[in-house]
């Protein structure tokens, strides 16, 4: 049950960039348990299950997969960046290269934050993509879309197409 929505960001004055967010599932049931197990109980096998949910959603013509990285503090606490693990499994399943293209700036938390607090909390530095590349950004959960808007807004070349999952 894929869930789609279109969102927009205005990285430069007077210029809106539209992108598609596609979720493989609502954050409930088996999907919710898999995400929580991966993030908070170190159940790394769940990353393969989550990647398999995303596999049918990878658009034809995707050039590269990347992920919305967690904060360095969270990665150190958990021992892994769970979105990276999902992206790497997905890349192996669909034979698309996986590259780190975003670096998270700061250690702000999304979990437990209000909608308004999330809006400007996440910032990224983008690097390493070519003009016109079809980039798919993987994240574990999308609530307000703030993380995906931040990823798109930091895209160095706004002619690239980003699709979020």
Image (cartoon, rainbow, N blue to C red):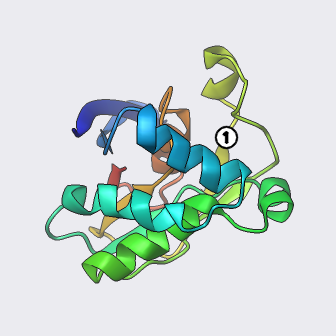
Q: Of helix, strand and loop, which one carries label 1? A: loop
Residue for point 61% across, 17% down: 115
Figure check: 58 above or below 90? above
Residue position marked by numbered label 1 in the rendering: 122
At horizontal 81% and vertical 49% (from top left) the residue drawn is 106
Picture quadrant of residue 90: bottom left
Residue 161 horizontal side relative to residue 27, left or right: left
Residue 2 percent across, percent down from the top left: 23, 40
Give the image location of residue 145, x and y in percent: 47, 32
Nearest the viewer among 58 and 101 is 58
Taking the spot 82% from the left edge, 47% from the top edge, the residue there is 107
Asked whether the viewer can see residue 7, the reply is yes
Q: So how many labels did they put on this image?
A: 1
Q: Nearer the viewer, residue 95 or 19?
A: 95
Note whether 51 is above or below 152 in the view shown.
Answer: below
In the rendered structure, the answer to whether residue 82 lies left or right of residue 140 reads right
Crowd class of label 1 (few under 14; some 14 to 19; many from 20; radius 10 Å): many
Q: Quadrant of the N terminus?
A: top left
Give left or right: position of 48 versus 1. right
The spot of residue 52 in percent (x, y) is 33, 63
Depth order, front residue of 106/59? 59
């Amino acid at each position: 049950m894929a869930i789609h929505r279109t969102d927009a960001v205005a990285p430069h004055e007077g210029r809106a960039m539209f992108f598609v967010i596609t979720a493989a599932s609502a954050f409930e049931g088996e999907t919710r348990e898999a995400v929580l197990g991966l993030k908070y109980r170190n159940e790394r096998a769940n990353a393969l299950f989550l990647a398999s949910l995303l596999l049918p959603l990878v658009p034809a013509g995707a050039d590269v997969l990347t992920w919305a990285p967690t904060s360095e503090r969270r990665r150190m606490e958990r021992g892994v960046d769970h979105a990276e693990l999902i992206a790497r499994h997905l890349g192996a399943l669909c034979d698309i290269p996986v590259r780190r293209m975003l670096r998270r700036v700061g250690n702000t938390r999304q979990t437990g934050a209000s909608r308004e607090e999330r809006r400007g909390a996440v910032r990224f530095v983008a690097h390493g993509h070519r003009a016109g590349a079809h980039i798919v950004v993987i994240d574990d959960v999308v609530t307000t879309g703030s993380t995906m808007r931040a990823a798109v807004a930091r895209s160095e070349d706004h002619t690239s197409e980003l699709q979020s999952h």
